[in-house]
Image (spheres, grey):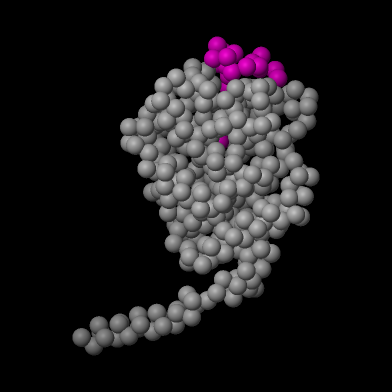
Amino acid sequence: MGSLRARACAILAVLVAAGPACAQAPADFYRGKTIQFLIGYEPGTGYDLYARLLTRYYGKHIPGAPNVVPQNMPGAGSIKAANYLFEVSPRDGTQVGMVGRGTPMTPLLGGRGATFKDAESFSWIGSMNNEVSVCVAWHTSGVKTIEEAMQRELTTSATSLGADDTTVFPAALNAMIGTKFKWITGYPGGSAMNLAMERGEAQGRCGWSWSSIKSTHPEWLKDNKIALLLQLSLGRHPDLPNVPLIMDYAKTNEQRAVLELIFARQVMGRPVLAPPALPADRLEALRRAFDATMRDPAFLAEAEKGNWEITPVPGEEIEALMKRVYATPPAIVELAKQVTPQPR
């Protein structure tokens, strides 16, 4: 009896001591602190460049003006970073990150490696753009159109098996429109995948962000080093009026529903997220700071100079998107799994 009373008193003491910290205003909490910004890919990739651009301006818009320090945590197409944010990171707003747009779909589509059960639980801060990805062929491949990719095999470089764009997208295209992509996995990120094309190890990439191409390899476009075969998104990009869109190939309502599920990830092209169960006022502060950063004149000037596309999506919209995606009818989810036949 005495032991129970002692334990109850100890718990009460902890709760009382924690009270002021829990009630601490975001500005007071963040003042003098450092926010660690985890990047799920290697240095030099499109995700890395976008994340580092954000970290240079983000902190000044957060109440208390904390330092924001980027740290790369590559692995399994950014699943390693997502797992870390979900399971290990403190749930106090001192660690946030950027992962691949397809990573949150991993549990839904049956991919392997994710230890988080669903992506609805993350604290969604926003996305730096609403992305359009493309499939491209290297100029020596002999393939210049998506129709030619339906007639001959085209090897593409990829990161990891599972729900990563570079394997899911070509697999879906093979199953639904009859392309003959054959992907080679094991590349840690975009820089290595591009080098694979230059070395002749691969003949193209499928699931490559258009914004990354413009910012990292504009000379390849100018010199016709790559052919743009297909747009992968729910809508066309204004830069690409003559490149066919995947949604145009849907022949039935069922096919359209499957394609919409697979390519819904494009809306959150460069997603920024934090661990689940963040204090509500800190999540609100991080979201509003993100929105303010996306309007910051200095940030936008640097983005324009680097040819980085900024079409932001608020955290509330990403949160709503995740709820809609995870509420997809099971029959459509099952069909999506079937057309993205990755090892489970």
Which percent across, then down, holds residue 75?
A: 54, 45
Q: Can the viewer see residue 112 in this picture?
A: no
Q: Which residue is the extreme one toward the top?
A: 151
Q: In which quarter of the image is residue 210?
A: top right
Q: Which residue lies at the image location 52% right of the left edge and 76% below the top edge?
A: 24
Q: Which residue lies at the image location 59% right of the left edge and 28% below the top edge?
A: 231
State whether the magenta stretch is mostly helix, strand or loop. Answer: loop
Which percent across, then down, holds residue 157?
A: 59, 29
Which image quadrant: the N terminus?
Answer: bottom left
Which percent across, then down, holds residue 33?
A: 62, 70
Residue 200 sits above or below residue 215 on the image: above
Residue 141 is covered by the magenta coloring: yes
Which percent across, then down, holds residue 317?
A: 51, 49
Q: Which residue lies at the image location 53% right of the left edge and 33% below the top edge?
A: 234
Q: What stretch is highlighted in magenta?
A: 138-161
Q: Which residue is the extreme one toward the left?
A: 1
Q: Quadrant of residue 71?
A: bottom right
Which image quadrant: the C terminus?
Answer: top left
**Left or right side of 29 for 280:** left
Residue 137 sits above or below residue 311 on the image: above
Q: Which residue lies at the image location 70% right of the left edge and 51% below the top edge?
A: 53
Residue 271 is covered by the magenta coloring: no
Total labels drawn = 0
Q: Can the viewer see residue 310 in this picture?
A: yes
